[in-house]
Image (cartoon, rainbow, N blue to C red):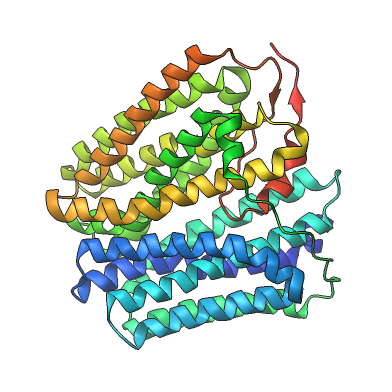
């Protein structure tokens, strides 16, 4: 309880931020389609979000070093609020692309500040409990945000975006009125993408495939849902079911990843992902319950891949490079996430909704083939790091999870 009270301002900011950011992507898709945007243009909005996210991950640590944590958070939140509120001024996909870049910068910047603040406040004794609570709060708020989508879509457009803007602005308040001392800003992280490939080519490719799966589903999933006949409120449940499935799968995936060759676990998850894609497409005509079951299964099989991949990469990483490796994995995830929404939405426009899962299946088939190749390239490591459920929130997350990754003795 004391830990929860200590970090309550940070956790409350996370909740409000998620309620804002978790609703804007699906709302943009639903409102954009209603206003005549093509599926390709809606996909560009999702890609723009991840472009802004990458820029925010790079810029926020430097901003913290210049103006401090609180002012950096306020600056990023103001940028996000402007991007949200501006949606009601013009109904143009290219203008909305700029607005979504601003929202992406906001999300990455705010998470960077929150995670840096947590890093400065935790000790080795409280790190595990703080990270566990942080993950529960973040996922729970993301889950709740999906259920807002149906209600938002039934409101006037300006009211819906104003509500998201209010949540975004409100996330400043817990940190602004907190009596906690603002931490001293640490140095900016070195972004060294080559380190990811040097440690594990398989983990690098797996992270990109994870981005293709997750970013496509989160940003283009509303298009798929509307194409297969889901109502706006059902699309919210559709996305929430995916989030819930992914969260529940982390524990069994972690158990497997800590006891078996992680390359085999990645191959198994990708094979299961191909099956889940086929089942999701097959159950699209069996009513909304079948579509929801497909979404849950898709989340179970695809979401844990990022954490298993990063754990595998850390098995080959020196202790002094763990923070930079986490940032490198986030970089490759951002690369895949920037490209995926636009390309998959364009394919949906050309070939129909099932093409979303065809593309994702092909990516996982490629990962299976590469994983089988890498199994022959070198033996499994004798000592492995602990599995850590790695959030894809900011480059700074590596500093929070780095000390959780202690090496276990080999089998």
Point 61% across, 18% down: residue: 259
Occupied quadrant, residue 177: bottom right
Residue 154 visible in the picture: no
Question: Which quadrant would the C terminus be assigned to in this image?
Answer: top right
Nearest to the observer: residue 148 or residue 71:
71
Left or right placement of residue 3 versus residue 226 in this view: right
Rendered location of residue 208, percent (x, y): 44, 41
Rendered location of residue 106, percent (x, y): 55, 70
Point 68% across, 54% down: residue: 396
Point 21% across, 77% down: residue: 35
Occupied quadrant, residue 345: bottom left
Nearest to the observer: residue 225 or residue 47:
47
Point 79% across, 46% down: residue: 127
Left or right placement of residue 19 versus residue 91 in this view: right
Q: Count of labels shown?
A: 0
Question: Which quadrant would the N terminus be assigned to in this image?
Answer: bottom right
Rendered location of residue 371, percent (x, y): 44, 22
Residue 264 visible in the picture: yes
Is 302 above or below relative to 255? below
């Amino acid at each position: 309880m004391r830990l929860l009270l200590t970090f309550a301002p940070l956790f409350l900011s996370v909740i409000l931020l998620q309620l804002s950011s978790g609703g804007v992507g699906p709302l943009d898709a639903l409102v954009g389609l209603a206003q005549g945007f093509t599926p390709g243009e809606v996909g560009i909005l999702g890609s723009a979000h991840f472009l802004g996210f990458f820029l925010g991950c790079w810029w926020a640590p430097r901003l913290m070093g210049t103006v401090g944590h609180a002012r950096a958070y306020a600056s990023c939140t103001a940028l996000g609020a402007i991007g949200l509120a501006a949606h009601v001024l013009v109904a143009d996909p290219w203008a909305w692309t700029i607005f979504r870049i601003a929202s992406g910068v906001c999300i990455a910047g705010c998470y960077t500040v929150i995670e840096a603040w947590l890093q400065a406040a935790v000790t080795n004794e409280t790190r595990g409990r703080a990270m566990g609570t942080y993950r529960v709060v973040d996922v729970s708020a993301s889950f709740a945000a999906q259920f807002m989508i149906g209600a938002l879509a039934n409101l006037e457009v300006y009211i819906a975006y104003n509500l998201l803007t209010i949540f975004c602005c409100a996330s400043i308040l817990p940190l602004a009125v907190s009596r906690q001392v603002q931490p001293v800003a640490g140095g900016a992280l070195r972004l060294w993408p080559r380190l990811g490939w040097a440690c594990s080519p398989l983990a690098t490719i797996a992270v990109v495939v994870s981005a293709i799966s997750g970013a496509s589903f989160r940003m283009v999933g509303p298009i798929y849902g509307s194409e297969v006949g889901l109502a706006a409120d059902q699309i919210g449940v559709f996305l929430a079911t995916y989030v819930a499935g992914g969260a529940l799968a982390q524990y069994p995936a972690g158990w497997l990843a800590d006891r078996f060759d992680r390359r085999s676990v990645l191959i198994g998850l990708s094979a299961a992902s191909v099956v889940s894609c086929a089942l999701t497409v097959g159950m699209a005509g069996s009513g909304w319950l079948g579509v929801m079951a497909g979404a849950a299964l898709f989340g179970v099989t695809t979401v844990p891949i990022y954490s298993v991949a990063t754990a595998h990469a850390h098995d080959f990483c020196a202790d002094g490079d763990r923070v930079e490796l986490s940032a490198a994995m986030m970089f490759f995830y951002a690369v895949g996430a920037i490209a995926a929404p636009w390309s998959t939405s364009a394919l949906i426009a050309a070939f129909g909704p099932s093409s979303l899962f065809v593309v994702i299946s092909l990516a996982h088939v490629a990962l299976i083939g590469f994983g089988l190749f890498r199994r022959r390239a070198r033996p499994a490591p004798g000592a492995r790091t602990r599995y850590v459920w790695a959030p894809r929130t900011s480059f700074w997350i590596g500093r929070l999870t780095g000390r959780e990754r202690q090496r276990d003795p080999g089998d």
